[in-house]
Image (tube, rainbow, N blue to C red):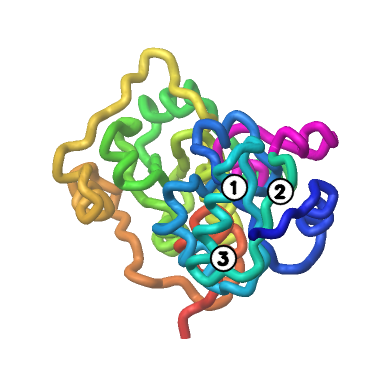
Amino acid sequence: MPNQISCRGLAALMASESLHAVFDVRERGEFNMGQISNATSLPRRQIEFRIAELVPNRRIPIVVYDEGGGRAALAANSLAEFGYANVSILDGGLPEWRKEELPTVSGVNVPSKAFGEKVHHERTIPEISPEELKSLQERVADLMIFDVRTPEEYGRFCIPGGVNVPGGDLILWAEALKRKPETTVVVNCAGRTRSIIGTAALLRLGLNNVRALWNRRPRGLRPAHPTRAASTPERSRCGSLRRRGCHGFQPASFSITRQEMRLVSPILSMCDPKVSTRTAT
């Protein structure tokens, strides 16, 4: 029989320095409507496929919760079958947590968005509005637009002239951009978080003329649709660069120094979990 943990007990655990994992086992739509702050969405039906990657250490304490129904108990039993020995169920679930007026949030990717806003505020990230970007496209020749979304997102639509440079790949362009300081660089994503993080990374690497795009499309500007070849993950990173033209730029295969990687890794690893904080030897 899985252990029970009180709401106050879970709050104390989450405020502590000890390793732990808290999973909301409801469906993603329910999670987005309201969740315990800093909990991770892990729907009951996905546990078998994701838990080994999320919690490789089976000794770490795990807490699961739902709306107060039976899914948390089923999830706890599944975790026990997979060898996780320290699993607890939140007593009363999310309704009891709310009843005790403990913090909840709503939305998608809340921790990373909060981190992006923190970076934006503390580092005073320069921004550009969609209208200003449209004006730059019409009158400035030395302009680079980096779309830091995934190749799949980019393949659906993009800003005309935008080059797909997913996540941590952006820092590979730093040295080439430094050689042309007159070039205006604009970083965009689907909302604003990834563009803030990408801009912050380039600023830390010594670029000055770089701005993050606000998260709305300018009136009258229709999104472009990349060619079929550019929409595939393998070619959107390089093939589309040649077709669209990059004003003589070529990304480095790996020109990042150890010192530069130490500068940007803490930022990029929060935005893209595939970016390692370890540097190359």
Q: Is residue 108 above or below residue 253?
A: above
The amino acid at mark 3 is Ser
Assign a secondary structure to mark 1: helix
Q: Residue at 60% x, 29% y: name it.
A: 33
**First of labels 1, 2 by sequence position:** 1
Q: Residue at 49% x, 56% y: name it.
A: 272
Alpha carbon distance from label 3 to label 1: 36 Å
Assign a secondary structure to mark 2: strand
Assign a secondary structure to mark 3: helix
Other-residue count near label 2 (Cα within 10 Å), few / some / many at <14 / 14–19 / ≥20? many
Alpha carbon distance from label 1 to label 2: 8 Å
Q: Residue at 59% x, 50% y: name it.
A: 73
**Magenta region includes residue 101:** yes
Q: Quadrant of the N terminus?
A: bottom right
The amino acid at mark 1 is Ala
- Residue 259: where, in percent of width, then height? 58, 75
Find out whether the residues at labels 3 and 1 contact each other: C-beta distance under 8 Å: no
145 or 44: nearer the eye? 44
Q: Can see residue 177?
A: no
User: Where are the magenta residues, as a range?
Assistant: 94-115
- Residue behind mark 3: 265
- Residue behind mark 1: 72
Find out whether the residues at labels 1 and 2 contact each other: C-beta distance under 8 Å: yes
Q: Is residue 118 left or right of residue 150?
A: right
